[in-house]
Amino acid sequence: MALETVKEDEEVYSWREVQLLHIAELEREKLERKRGRDIIIAVDHGPNSKYAFDWALIHFCRLADTLHLVHAVSNVKNEIVYNASEELMVKLAMEAFQVAMVKSTARIVEGDPGKVICKEAERIKPAAVILGTRGRGFIQSVLKGSVSEYCMRNCKSAPVVIVPGKEAGDESMI
């Protein structure tokens, strides 16, 4: 029996790649993509995440860019959670192509959302990390914690763009 040394501060990093539908129209852009940017968009099932995604497509993305959709879950092995997340990622990737004609990749990662986003940013080295916020006040963010606050303080490999949540009654930009 061999013993393996485990570092105390090292966390297990579990993830599953999402296979997105092949979009033939993207093949024509291979030469243009050489100068495109990598952009991470952190997504979840909430309306503020969708609003940040829409904002990124309209105000930030260019034709040659590649969007890296990142979604943090508690367990990637739970098929119900994975299937719901996969459905969200496929829907967003199709929308990104239809609206901004950008290529997308998607990853569903197990772990704390803030840590997952920062770890993915370290791996990809994007031009920016874009995420939404719930619009909590300063006191609530400090007491309850905030993914956007965590990313702003700990994401060292890219600028973090925090898109304020949409006001009740605002219509989607797309």
Image (cartoon, rainbow, N blue to C red):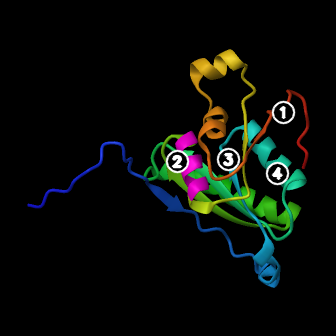
At horizontal 62% and vertical 35% (from top left) the residue drawn is 147
- Marks 1/2: CA distance? 26 Å
Eyeballing the image, is 40 above or below 47?
below
- The residue type indicated by label 4 comes to Ala
Residue placed under numbered mark 4 in the picture: 56
| Label 3 crowd bin: few (<14), some (14–19), many (20+), radius 10 Å | many
- The residue type indicated by label 2 comes to Val
Chain part drawn in magenta: 114-122
Task: From the top left corner, tell me how far across and down residue 122 is, in percent.
Answer: 57, 55
Farthest residue in the front direction? 156
Task: From the top left corner, tell me how far across and down residue 34 is, in percent.
Answer: 76, 78
At horizontal 76% and vertical 65% (from top left) the residue drawn is 37
- Marks 4/2: CA distance? 25 Å
- Please report contact status of discs 1 and 3: CB closer than 8 Å, yes or no: no
- Label number found at residue 43: 3
Q: Is residue 167 left or right of residue 70?
A: right
Residue placed under numbered mark 2 in the picture: 81
Instruction: Kindly report which numbered mark, 2 or 3, lies closer to the viewer in this rendering.
Output: 3
- Label number found at residue 166: 1
Which element carries disc 3, helix, strand or loop? loop
Q: Earlier in the sequence, mark 1 or mark 3?
A: 3
- The residue type indicated by label 3 comes to Val
- Please report contact status of discs 1 and 2: CB closer than 8 Å, yes or no: no
Task: From the top left corner, tell me how far across and down residue 46 is, in percent.
Answer: 70, 38
Q: Earlier in the sequence, mark 2 or mark 3?
A: 3
- Please report contact status of discs 2 and 3: CB closer than 8 Å, yes or no: no
User: Is 54 contained in the magenta span?
Assistant: no
Which element carries disc 4, helix, strand or loop? helix
